[in-house]
Image: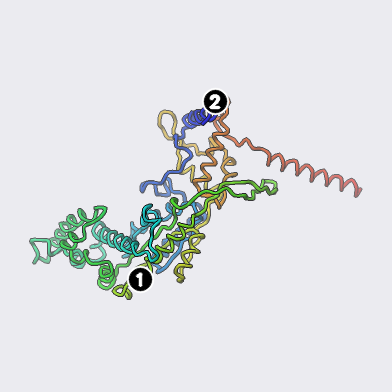
């Protein structure tokens, strides 16, 4: 970075401190589980509220594909849906299992996946098995299944000295004792299934038999939620795009847009092949379709590859792309102002930044991160002199507004000449 760039960086940092914005502004960091809440930092626009309710309603459907514009918060949406369903999993007898593409396929695997994706099937089975058992021991399933049925599910009776007692109080005590042992085992990143099977033969069953048991005897279903977005296989390309000025004039400019690599599409095909194998196992053939709901979060571009890999009757839900007002609102939710003493201010982001600066960078072909990076570059470009830096940053590009004014003046002059000619 040259001296001028360093100076602008310093001015930008001083300005953020002066207006009460943290130094990481305007970068969008992943939301914590606590912040994944509409009353905190998770933004839900008026166009998105009804769609989110539809997704939650459809979670119990066999096969759903949620189409999210590439780079427009697909993973954040998937995490929020998972959190909401997890909160009511016992009530609905539905255990959510969330997997993301970047977690299932490591960097080492991505370049060397076999054609049949045989190495992905064990990953899917192990994650399903682990998260199902975790839910069964971490949540109070005895409330909906009944203490005796739940005691049998986790094999609590065999772990207690009071094995012959049927009193509910004693059964509950046995459940808590067994649950404590099981929690210690399932909380490990890689649970030892031999240890779990020794403590609870039912929970230690292979995945196909575990699914069959949950369905036939307890009426519990599984929602496999697959986040097929990826930052690892997404890259930026500079392409010519059309932009429209406030006056309606269209101009072709070069902008960075986000695209998926060919490797991404190959990995999608391998992953779907592994899921298909999960369905086609002889021991699971009659069980998996009846027990396992599938909920995919994917871009329209990736969805084409998904349907080409396995053409099924997907229930499609379109999640609206973010517009300029949405992106500015996301930044406002993400960044709350603080003064130099650390106190939260009530002003919104609009009190210190003109939304027009961001509006010029919003494009459905660009990821949120790309839009924000361009927005940040623009803000730095405005920071020429600290002595002249304003509290409220405004766009320095007035060409479009001037062009619109001039065009209107020309139209008025033409009308006046026409009127003079008529008279």
Image side of residue 12 versus residue 248, left or right:
left
Pointer 2 local density, CA inside 10 Å: few below 14, some 14–19, many at least 20? some
**For the image shown, how many numbered marks are present on the structure?**
2
Q: CA separation, marks 1 and 2? A: 63 Å
Tell me the SS state at disc 2.
helix
Q: Earlier along the polypeptide chain: callout 1 or callout 2?
A: 1
Residue 6 visible? The answer is yes
Q: Residue 262: horizontal and vertical position, in percent?
A: 48, 57
Tell me the SS state at disc 1.
helix
Q: Residue 4: horizontal and vertical position, in percent?
A: 55, 28
Label 1 sits on residue: 279
Q: Residue 188: horizontal and vertical position, in percent?
A: 24, 53
Can you tell which mark lies on residue 159? none
Can you tell which mark lies on residue 386? 2
372 to 108, vertically: above or below: above
Image side of residue 37 versus residue 212, left or right:
right
């Amino acid at each position: 970075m040259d001296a001028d760039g360093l100076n602008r960086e310093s001015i930008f940092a001083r300005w953020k401190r002066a207006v009460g914005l943290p130094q990481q502004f305007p970068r969008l960091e992943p939301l914590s589980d606590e912040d994944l809440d509409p009353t905190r930092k998770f933004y839900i626009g008026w166009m998105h509220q009804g769609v989110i309710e539809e997704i939650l309603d459809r979670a119990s459907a066999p096969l759903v594909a949620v189409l999210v514009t590439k780079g427009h918060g697909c993973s954040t949406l998937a995490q929020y849906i998972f959190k909401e369903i997890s909160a009511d999993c016992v009530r609905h007898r539905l255990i959510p299992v969330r997997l993301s593409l970047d977690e299932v396929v490591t960097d080492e695997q991505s370049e060397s996946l076999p054609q049949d994706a045989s190495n992905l099937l064990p990953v899917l089975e192990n994650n399903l098995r682990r998260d199902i058992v975790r839910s069964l021991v971490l949540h109070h399933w005895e409330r909906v299944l009944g203490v005796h049925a739940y005691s049998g599910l986790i094999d609590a009776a065999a772990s207690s000295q009071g094995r012959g007692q049927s009193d509910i109080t004693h059964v509950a005590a046995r459940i808590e004792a067994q649950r404590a042992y099981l929690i210690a085992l399932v909380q490990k990143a890689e649970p030892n299934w031999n240890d779990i099977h020794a403590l609870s033969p039912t929970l230690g069953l292979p995945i196909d038999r575990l699914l069959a048991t949950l369905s036939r005897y307890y009426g519990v279903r599984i929602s496999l939620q697959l986040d097929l977005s990826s930052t690892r296989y997404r890259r930026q390309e500079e392409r010519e795009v059309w932009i429209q000025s406030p006056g309606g004039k269209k101009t072709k400019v070069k902008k960075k847009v986000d695209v998926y690599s060919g490797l991404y599409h190959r990995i999608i095909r391998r992953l779907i092949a592994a899921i298909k194998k999960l369905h086609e196992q002889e021991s699971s053939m009659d069980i998996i379709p009846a027990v396992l709901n599938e909920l995919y979060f994917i871009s329209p571009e990736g969805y084409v590859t998904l349907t080409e890999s396995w053409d099924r009757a997907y229930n499609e839900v379109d999640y609206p792309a973010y517009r300029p007002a949405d992106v500015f609102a996301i930044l406002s939710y993400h960044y709350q102002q603080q003064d130099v003493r650390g106190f939260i201010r009530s002003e919104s982001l609009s009190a210190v930044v003109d939304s027009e600066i961001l509006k010029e960078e919003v494009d459905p072909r660009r990821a949120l991160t790309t839009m924000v990076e361009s927005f940040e570059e623009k803000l730095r470009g405005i920071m020429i002199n600290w002595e002249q830096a304003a509290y409220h940053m405004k766009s320095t590009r007035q060409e479009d507004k001037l062009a619109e004014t001039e065009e209107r003046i020309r139209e008025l002059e033409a009308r006046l000449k026409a009127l003079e000619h008529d008279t």
